[in-house]
Each structure stands twice: as C-alpha cells, then as structure tokens.
Image (cartoon, rainbow, N blue to C red):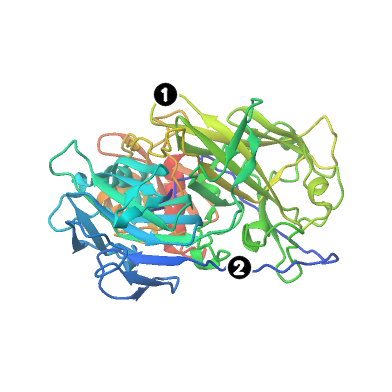
Amino acid sequence: MDCFKYMKNANRCSSVFVLIFISLASSIHVIFSANYIPSEQIFLNCGESLILNDTDTRSWTPDVGSKFLLSAKSSISKAITQDPLVPKVPYMTARLSQSEFSYRFPVVPGRMLVRLHFYSNLYNGHNATNAIFSVSAYNRLNTTNNRFFYLPGSFTLLRNFSTSQTTYALNCAYIVREYLIAVDGETLTIKFTPSTNSSNAYAFVNGIEVISMPNIYYNDNGLKLVGQDSLIFVDNTTAPESVYRINVGGNDISPSGDTGLFRSWYNDQPYLYGETVGVTVTADPSKTIISYPKGMPTYVAPENVYSTARSMGLNPQINKNSNLTWIFSVDVGFYYLVRLHFCEVRAAINQINRRRFNIFLGNETAESGVDVIRWTKYNRVPVYKDYVVIVGGEGPQQDLWLALHPNLSEQPQYYDAILNGIEIFKLSDTDDNLAGANPIPGPKQDVVDSSKTLPSSHAGMGKTSPSDGPAGQLPKTNTTGIYASSLLSNLCRHFSFPEIKAATKNFDETLLLGVGGFGKVYGGEIEGGTKVAIKRGNPLNGQGVHEFQTEIDLLSKL
C-alpha cells in the first residue's frame, strides 16, 4: 500500500550517511533496458467530467458518463478542502454512495495491475469518519442468455476499510492500494460496498488504474516458506497486494520513472533500524551501464534501482558484530512474498567470495552465504530472489524484520552485505481475502515546530524506540512522493521565537547537546519543566526547508 506521507518517519539512529561514488568500466555485453508497453491502460478519474493530465503527464478519463460505471445510485463530489501538496488529479473529485456501486472494465484475459486511489476528505457533506466500506474484485463473469452473474473468482480487497482512520494512523496525505489480479474472462469488476455497521457509512473512490502487466511476479513452481519445508504457490489463483516497494540506497522513483508499469519506488531510510545503517553506494552514471542478463526482462525493475545500493561499510570489525536491518509494519495472518534485488556496482567486487552474507527474514534464515557474483558472474549485472514468509502474532499489525549479516564462516575478502531493492507483497489467503484490520493510531507525540515563525529555528520533542507503542508505526509505502504538508499545522504545536529563546535561555551554549552539519541542537524546558530538544538551523549550510523539516522529523523520533 502506498501511503503518501506528510513527513517521512525518522530513522532510529543518528549515524552519518556516506555517499560513495563508484567508477566502473563496461566490458561485458549490454542488454539495454526497455519499458513494458501495456496492452490495457485505463486511468479513471472518478467524479470528474473532463479529461485531465496528472503530474506524470498521464491522461485520466472521467467517469462521468463513462461506460465503465455500472448504473447505480451514486453521486460525484469535489473535495471540500484541498491540501496544496495533494495532486489535483485524481484526488480532487470522488464517486461516492451510501449504496453499493461498481465499475466493470472490459479487458483481455491476463494479469492486471489495479490501483485504487483514496483521499480522505469531506464529500457532499458526508463526514470523512463515515467513509467505511469494503471493496471486492471479480475476475470472472458469465453473460449467458443476456444475463450476467459472478462466477467464483472474486477477491476481497478491503473490508470495513476506514480511510479516515488509516490516514490519521499513518499520517498520510492520501492512499494508494495496488493489487495484482489475474483475469480469466473478459471483464474485471470492482465493487464498493458501504459498511452495514453504520447507517451513515458510505463508500467512495477518487481514481482507479487498470494496467495489463507481464508475468514478473507469479511463480507456478512454488517458493519455499522461510524456516519451513512447505511450498507456497504464487499463481493465477493468488492476488498479491503490493505493500512496500523500496529503492535501497537511492532516491524516490515516480511512476514516470518506472519501466512502463507506473510503479512508485521509495527511499529506504524511513525503514532502517539500529545504529548500523551502512553507506549508500551509487555507480557512476557516466561510466556504468546496468547489464540485464539473458532471460530477465529489463522491466522487472528500473536501472535506477540496480545502480544504487546500501552496504554495511568498510569497517570489518563493526560489520562482524552488526546487522544491516530494515523493519516493515504488515498485517498479521498472511503470507508475504519478499523480493530482494541485488547488483554489485562496486568495481572491487568482481570475483566470487569477495563479499558474502546471510539473509534473515522474520528472525529466520532465508539464505546463507549469499554471493551476488556467484549468481551473476559479473558485477553490474542484476539479479533478484524471491522468499515467502508468514507473519503471525497479536494485534492487527506486526513488524517484519529484514536483516543482512556478513557470512563469517566463508571468510570472504570483505565482511560486508549489499542490497539494491525490496518489494513486499501480501498474498491473498485461502478465502481469497486480502483485507486486514485498520491500523491503530499510535500514542500522540508532542512536536514543537517554530518554522512558521522563524525558518532558522525548529524545535521538536518526543522519544520513541522500536518497543514503544503498538506495531505499525512505520509508514506503509510508501509508499512516490513523500511530502511535507499543511497538515503539520494541525498536528504540531507551534511556538513563537521568543518562547524558544526563553526555553533555551537565549540559546545558551551551556545547553548545547550537539552540533551537526545543518546546525546546533540545544536542550531546553517548556511548560513547567517539559524537556525538549531544539534544533536551530544554520542559514549558511545550504540546507533547504524540506531537508530541514525531514531532519527535524528524524530528531523528534530519537
């Protein structure tokens, strides 16, 4: 699930990130990347009557008068309020109803990528908290004797889904849910049903994407369940839901930067855990060409995913006693397909046993002695590996841990690990269900924000650790575009500059907690002794407002 956040969740560490540029020379055969061209490509702007383009220049078809909308009692509405950082298309209009309504898309049989877009807001006077509904997808339809009815093959995508609660719990600006559905017939029907638990409940949707996709995620041969001997089949009877898509060590990649499937990839920093966060490695773009191996479609992942990575660093003593760890909040009670992308872009890693490491998923060993060069034979050649894990436990969500650790027994030249990309998919259960519980909001964190009164001063307080509060506090993918937003004015306590000066005794140097490249951090007290950490930016460092806000969000979580 893409959850477009107002502010990135902070890394739970204070280590300095190092960017290493690697210069590589090309010496092997190159397969140039080519985008996938979908045979079906529908972008439906719900509640709209005009054809409009989004920020990625995609043209969205209005659903008013559309052949896709089945006749039903529904209405259209504009969002009453508009956050300036929420894209106009497709989020400023919606189709909604207190009764069931459906869309039917004629498609060629095959695998479809379906995205549902939601922007929690006021529509036609309906309170946002009453938007509680279920969504089902039907991939088979019988039209015998001019009558249609659904055949077995439906998937429950959402059940009693509260967009308001999800938006609040995850601090989202808007939500995108992405599903992979195999269509056996010639139609795909998506049905929205308001909850029966409340007379005021209604269903709504802002946008729907239906895109044909290649067979890059399904595996009819079965995948071994991590920690067990059983096989899990990801075939046409399964409907995976994309919950995380991460560009490890690299920047966010927008839909237009993907390989024709309009996927969003996100930087991995919000998901890193622990003091060892490693270093980012970026291949020199002027000298490096990613060479996709024969048999691997170039649209599996963009070159930008494989040309950037995160490794543990160059200190073997630290690496031997550390893990490179990411944590992801997921719904309990489901199997998850975890795809890891690898590509050795460092010139020195060009032979086997230069770098070897172990992969752990959910406290189980997924693979030991990983040697990317042994898999690919050359550096700058990408490869991906799929693993399946089951997530159990109490509560609606739990953390799924992914950790890498150097393999010491093989005595490689470098005690290190590397990773380029992560994709995590929730797999539909035996009842063809993907619906999990609504996320539970975590304990409220007090944040002091003076950026509205003086851009060079910003204060924050609050302390969390991985064990504080319920699971599920990390953003769910996050999902292209992580935005700062005007919602901060509602979530943050704002202090005037005189109040901040008083709290820090006019920035008394004896209260100095630390000095970083972006400014000084002072200790202080507010409102009867509440201790806070106050960051004062340095206007000479060249740091922009967005970077400053992101850093403050990180500091507030320490």
Amino acid identity at mark 2 = Asn
Examine the image and state in which quarter residue 198 appears. Answer: top left
Q: Residue at x 20, y 49 (%)?
A: 128
Examine the image and state in which quarter residue 43 appears. Answer: bottom left
x then y, percent, for residue 126: 15, 52
* Labels 1 and 2: the sequence-earlier one: 2
Instruction: Tell me if residue 426 comes above or below residue 454 in the rendering.
Output: above
Does dot 2 land on a helix, a strand or a loop? loop
The reply to whether residue 496 is visible in this rendering is no
Left or right? Give the position of 483 relative to 74: right
Q: Residue at x 16, y 56 (%)?
A: 73
Amino acid identity at mark 1 = Glu
Circle 2 residue: 35
Question: Dot 2: few (<14), some (14–19), or many (≥20) neighbours within 10 Å?
Answer: some
The reply to whether residue 422 is visible in this rendering is yes
Please identify the residue farthest to the front as the structure is shown: 145
x then y, percent, for residue 138: 38, 49
The image's mark for residue 91 is none
Instruction: Tell me if residue 331 comes above or below residue 71 in the rendering.
Output: above
Circle 1 residue: 394
Does dot 1 land on a helix, a strand or a loop? loop
Q: Residue at x 86, y 45 (%)?
A: 352
Q: Marks 1 and 2, Cα distance to the nearest angstrom?
A: 42 Å
Give 36 or 346, whichever is nearer the viewer.
36
Instruction: Tell me if residue 363 comes above or below residue 210 in the rendering.
Output: above
Left or right? Give the position of 314 relative to 88: right
Give 534 or 330, whichever is nearer the viewer.
330
Left or right? Give the position of 258 relative to 160: right
Question: Dot 1: few (<14), some (14–19), or many (≥20) neighbours within 10 Å?
Answer: few
